[in-house]
Amino acid sequence: IKQCTTVTMEQLFTVHHEMGHVEYYLQYKDQPVSFRRGANPGFHEAIGDVLSLSVSTPKHLNTIGLLDTLTDDS
């Protein structure tokens, strides 16, 4: 993915959202032509949102070194 960005949390989430779209495209690229479109535009967006949300969890941010302390609420 080539994108002009600044280093911000918002851009981190955006690039992961876009990677979700790319991964979804890759999953059906070898299907017959009639099946090479997303099932529904809303579902396509949901895939992007899932990746964006998963990268924003405190546990993941701590794992990749963007969150110094991790508080367990349980």
Image (tube, rainbow, N blue to C red):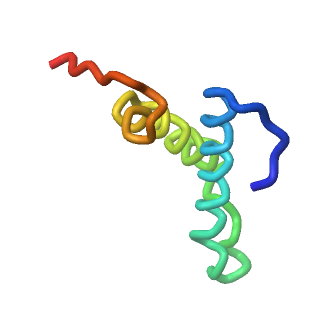
Q: Nearer the viewer, residue 36 or 57?
A: 57
- Give residue 58's position: percent from left, percent from top: 38, 28
> Where 25 falls versus 12 (above or below)?
below
Q: Nearer the viewer, residue 14 or 6?
A: 6
Query: Is residue 70 shown left or right of residue 1?
Result: left
Tell me the quarter of the picture where residue 62 sits: top left
Residue extending farthest to the right is 4
Tell me the quarter of the picture where residue 68 sits: top left
- Give residue 67's position: percent from left, percent from top: 43, 26
Residue at horizontal 71%, vertical 76%? 34
Residue at horizontal 61%, vertical 58%? 39
Dividing the image into 4 quarters, which one contains the C terminus? top left
Q: Nearer the viewer, residue 59 or 22?
A: 59
Q: How many numbered marks, from 0 up?
A: 0
Residue at horizontal 55%, vertical 38%? 52
Residue extending farthest to the left is 74
Residue at horizontal 73%, vertical 79%? 33
> Where 10 falls versus 25 (above or below)?
above
Q: Nearer the viewer, residue 21 or 64?
A: 64
- Give residue 36's position: percent from left, percent from top: 69, 71
Query: Is residue 58 shown left or right of residue 1?
Result: left
Query: Is residue 65 shown left or right of residue 28?
Result: left
- Give residue 41's position: percent from left, percent from top: 68, 47
Dividing the image into 4 quarters, which one contains the N terminus? bottom right
> Where 32 falls versus 69 (above or below)?
below
